[in-house]
């Protein structure tokens, strides 16, 4: 992969995008045989914090200095018959789409699709699968086409996304993005053939998709599955009038993209297995291994669409303590960040290690890293909301269970200090002001209230500053922040293995003393 970067010790260039990396973990694992999983293997959970800052150089025009158009955009409008009940949904969808079109900088490739049982291009509307190029005339023409939209038919997301994929194929804009809006469930896709699942697999890696719900008939799980597979976000508006401003905020974020992608490369040492990599802040998303160039070390995971922001990722590794020394820092994997060539300077951090220290002291392994523990609480909260919804669907028979699960979710929100989550839960639950603060599911709920809650419960927040992922959990001998000794790496001059500073022997293929000349 072509990379334009400097090391973390280099002087920052004016206008450079800076990428940061911290690794947080409790490095202590029990040397005793594992009670779960394959015999002899134990799991190490680490939190990787990745940050991107462009120094404020991304402009409102959607271009960074010295670059071309940042974006190729496809706007999908649900025009199924339900969008007319009430008509305010369709009017809001038109207003929002027009607002997005007006923000497209000149030179931006774009198209507008109408989605029903199938999808059609309403602009440029030439009958060919091509994109228009934004300029005053094209924006005006697209606005007219949007204003003329009517609604009929059903909802089938698979064909909509597949047409977007074909339109964006071959586009060279750094960010290829689809904005999908629907008011219904994916009821008219071919479920026996699992068409949506097949389309999502075909679209993975081709573009980012943000999936939005409007009205009261959309399905949160479908929006989340689209966003998870296509590296986007799932969201919804409670009031149709909120949609145009929400679209404007989204377009501003897209046009301020600092980096189209950042690749997380994990280089495990011999005998270490990568079990899972997923984003955990600002929402949970599964990361899948990406195809790497020949001769590339390790496994790469692609993250897309970076503005000025910080995201957290959880890495799960498995290793066998058999034959390993106790009380010694050993490397399980190296974490490296890579970016594509952008035409602008990018300052990348030095690689960081994920370590293990095998121990027979149970106190050392009893404290999970704060970031890992926090994500476990969020998982429990999401599961509690899902179970509460399933119980509510059973009517009076499930009311007590729904109340109990909402009480559990509220307790978790309090532990997390997540006031946003707590406020969303209190939209569907009443909590007594006096002890024992019993929780009761509300009487007047609709399905859409639960769909909003499910979406909201998928959003996560980072730990407080004192629990930052770059800090190891307290334990005997921990020096403190990652980077103060433990976080530094040395490279073997013989086989290019990367290992913890202070290592005396190579942990790679050659096993030679690190002091020997190359």
Image: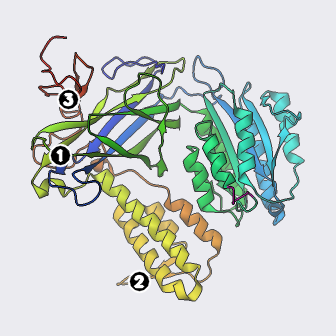
Residue shown at the point (67%, 52%) measured from the top left: 196
Image: 442 above or below 37: below
Disc assigned to residue 507 = 3
Q: Is residue 175 left or right of residue 22?
A: right
Query: Label 3, label 1: how many angstroms apart (C-alpha)?
Result: 15 Å
> Residues in magenta?
189-193
Residue shown at the point (14%, 28%) measured from the top left: 503
* Residue 306 makes an appearance in the image: no
Describe the element under mark 3 as helix, strand or loop.
loop
Q: Earlier in the sequence, mark 2 or mark 1?
A: 1
Position of the C terminus by quadrant = top left
Describe the element under mark 2 as helix, strand or loop.
loop
Q: Residue furthest bottom?
A: 396
Determine the image quadrant of residue 129: top right
Give coordinates of residue 250: x percent, y percent.
Answer: 62, 43
Residues tagged 2 and 3 counted as in contact (Cβ below 8 A): no
Residue shown at the point (58%, 55%) measured from the top left: 224
Image: 429 above or below 216: below
Q: Earlier in the sequence, mark 3 or mark 1?
A: 1
Q: Main secondary structure of the magenta part?
A: loop
Q: Is residue 191 left or right of residue 152?
A: left
Disc assigned to residue 321 = 1
Q: Residues within 10 Å of mark 1 (few under 14, many from 20)?
A: many
Query: Label 2, label 1: how many angstroms apart (C-alpha)?
Result: 47 Å
Residue of label 2: 438
């Amino acid at each position: 992969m072509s990379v334009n970067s400097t090391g973390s010790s280099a002087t920052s260039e004016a206008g450079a995008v800076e990428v940061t990396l911290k690794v947080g973990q409790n490095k202590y694992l029990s040397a005793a045989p594992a009670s779960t999983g394959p015999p002899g293997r134990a799991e190490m959970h680490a939190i990787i914090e990745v940050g991107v800052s462009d120094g404020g150089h991304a402009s409102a025009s959607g271009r960074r200095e010295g670059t071309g158009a940042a974006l190729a955009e496809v706007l999908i409008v649900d025009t199924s018959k339900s969008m007319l009940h009430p008509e305010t949904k369709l009017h809001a969808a038109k207003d929002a789409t027009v607002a997005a079109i007006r923000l497209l900088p000149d030179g931006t490739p774009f198209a507008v699709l109408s989605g029903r049982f199938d999808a059609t291009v309403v602009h440029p509307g030439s009958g060919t699968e091509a994109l228009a190029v934004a300029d005053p005339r094209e924006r005006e023409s697209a606005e007219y086409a949007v204003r003329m939209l009517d609604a009929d038919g059903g909802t089938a997301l698979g064909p909509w996304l597949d047409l977007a994929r074909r339109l964006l194929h071959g586009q060279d804009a750094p960010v290829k993005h689809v904005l999908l809006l629907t008011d219904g469930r994916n009821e008219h896709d071919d479920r026996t053939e699992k068409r949506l699942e097949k389309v999502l697999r075909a679209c993975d890696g081709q573009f980012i998709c943000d999936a939005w719900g409007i009205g009261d008939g959309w399905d949160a799980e479908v929006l989340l599955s689209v966003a998870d597979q296509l590296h986007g976000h799932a969201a919804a508006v409670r009031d149709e009038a909120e949609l145009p401003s929400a679209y404007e905020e989204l377009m501003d974020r897209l046009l301020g993209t600092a980096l189209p992608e950042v690749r997380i490369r994990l280089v495990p040492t011999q005998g270490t297995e990568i079990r899972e990599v997923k984003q955990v802040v600002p929402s949970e998303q599964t990361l899948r291994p990406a195809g790497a160039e020949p001769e590339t070390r390790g496994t790469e995971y692609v993250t897309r669409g970076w503005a000025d922001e910080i995201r957290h990722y959880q890495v799960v590794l498995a290793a066998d303590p058999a034959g390993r020394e106790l009380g010694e820092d050993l490397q399980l994997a190296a974490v490296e960040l890579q970016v594509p060539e952008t035409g602008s300077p990018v300052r990348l951090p030095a690689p960081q290690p994920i370590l293990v220290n095998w121990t027979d002291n149970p106190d050392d392994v009893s404290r999970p890293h704060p970031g890992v523990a926090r994500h476990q609480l969020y998982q429990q909260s999401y599961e509690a909301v899902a179970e509460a919804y399933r119980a509510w669907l059973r009517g009076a028979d499930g009311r007590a269970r729904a109340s109990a699960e909402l009480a559990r979710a509220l307790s978790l929100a309090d532990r997390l200090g997540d006031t946003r989550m707590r406020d969303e839960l209190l939209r569907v639950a009443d909590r007594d002001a006096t002890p024992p603060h019993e929780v009761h599911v509300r009487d007047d709920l609709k399905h859409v209230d639960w769909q909003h809650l499910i979406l909201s419960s998928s959003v996560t927040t980072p730990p407080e500053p004192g629990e930052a992922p770059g800090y190891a959990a307290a334990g005997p001998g921990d020096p403190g922040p990652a980077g103060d000794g433990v976080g530094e790496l040395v490279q073997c001059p013989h086989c290019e293995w990367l290992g913890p500073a202070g290592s005396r022997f190579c942990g790679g293929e050659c096993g030679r003393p690190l002091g020997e000349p190359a």
